[in-house]
Amino acid sequence: MNPVSVIGAGLAGCEAAWQLAQAGIPVNLYEMKPERYTPAHKYQGFAELVCSNSLKAARIGSAAGMLKEEMRILGSLTMACAAKSSVGAGGALAVDRKLFSDLVTEQITSHPNIQVITGEVTQIPEGYVIIATGPLTSDDFADCIFQLVGGKRLSFYDAAAPIVTAESIDMEKAYFAARYGRGDADYINCGMNEQEYKAFYQELIHGEVAPLHEFDRRDFKVYEGCMPVEVMAKRGEDTLRFGPLKPVGLNHPETGQKYYAVLQLRKENTQGSMYNLVGFQTNLKFGEQKRIFSMIPGLENAEFVRYGVMHRNTFLDSPRLLDNHFRLKQNPRILFAGQITGVEGYVESAASGIYAGLTLANQLNHKSEITLPQDTMLGALSAYISNPMVEDFQPMGANMGILPPLTERIKNKQLRYETIAARGLESLHRCLEESV
């Protein structure tokens, strides 16, 4: 059997290579370190953690904890090495970065079915390939990828808007309406009076922004349509009222009340469990986003499933390009994994590598294909990045909002999340048992 080429020895690439190798499939794992490093990477080991040593919450009744348990069930290398390199972090799973990387590297390089090939890849190899080169894919290989997909790409210095859960929006204050009553009332609207707006405005323009990485500062450019809301606000007190907070045509449909400014929230998914803050791309620190945006009437207790971010990010327009097994629709011998697919975060990247590797291993071993249920976190993530109904595609991390709702209503949030996680894990076990 010809080896599968896996490009990139980050979390996703190592997990994909591990799944294939454990299934008896020979793998050529390509990694450009130590010959060449991205601007963010410094250590020569594989699966290097750059921004943080945290793999998020450990409890299963959380989105990240649920995903990590699914990964353990699927034979994750990341989870096995994290358990051996963990450090105290309260309710989170955090690791000693160097030890973690060394453990992953040792497991990969000692596996009899994996051959590591050092050096930058600039052309896509023949045969089956899993591309896991991350959000800092080298320019030459990025050009190669985007030629492959016909130039359809999202690759720039981006500012993304926050997303909140629908159930956390106070609909006693917010309301559904379409501007001037035209079309369906699909938007949730949060109205502000003059005093509320001016207080919000002052906090916004003085909010603390997140520092950019050196490589982001060096070449930073934001498209006008993605301008951070705090930057736009500094152009003048009324700028937002003529832009994303324009109140005209959005009177309250029941009371007729007119507002000084109105924030609109748009559905993020088909089931309407998540909404994004329209026009609120931002580089504010996460804590500042929570504090300042919660000043808006209706969002006082909003649950943020994704905060706004600004950084260099190379990722595919996956809903148009990939299926729910991370395969390239137009050329299924090529799969993608990791943040280049639009999953956001360490654990999510590793999990996507597991799924891509598992999919290809089953195919090459002539086993039945496993489609993960959408009530599992990994199944929901793969469905999200491949959903053609998602128009303005932005990266997404694990969160409870992408899972189908429970049939029963549970008010207690902790109990509700634990029930959702138990449902998903039971569904995963059943799926795997049926595939044997």
Image (cartoon, helix red, strand yellow):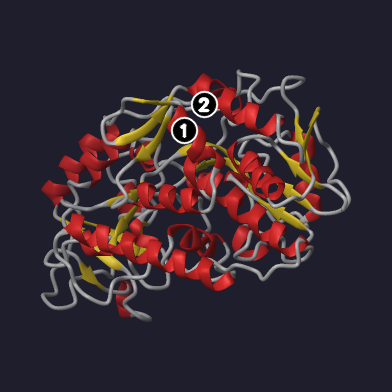
Quarter-wise, where is residue 412 in the image?
bottom left
Quarter-wise, where is residue 39 in the image?
top right
Could you tell whether 336 is left or right of 385 in the image?
right
Q: Residue at image x 66%, y 52%?
A: 357
**In the rendered structure, which amino acid carries the disc numbered 2?**
Phe
Q: Which residue is mark 2?
A: 100
Task: Examine the rendered structure and indicate whether residue 221 appears above or below residue 186.
Answer: above
Q: Which of pointers 2 and 1 lies earlier in the amino acid sequence?
A: 1
**In the rendered structure, which amino acid carries the disc numbered 1?**
Ala
Quarter-wise, where is residue 232 in the image?
top left
Task: Examine the rendered structure and indicate whether residue 152 appears above or below residue 89.
Answer: below
How many numbered discs, if any?
2
Q: Secondary structure at mark 2?
A: helix
Could you tell whether 336 is left or right of 310 in the image?
right
Q: Is any part of residue 362 visible from this angle?
A: yes
**Disc 2/disc 1 C-alpha distance (Å):** 6 Å
Disc assigned to residue 82: 1
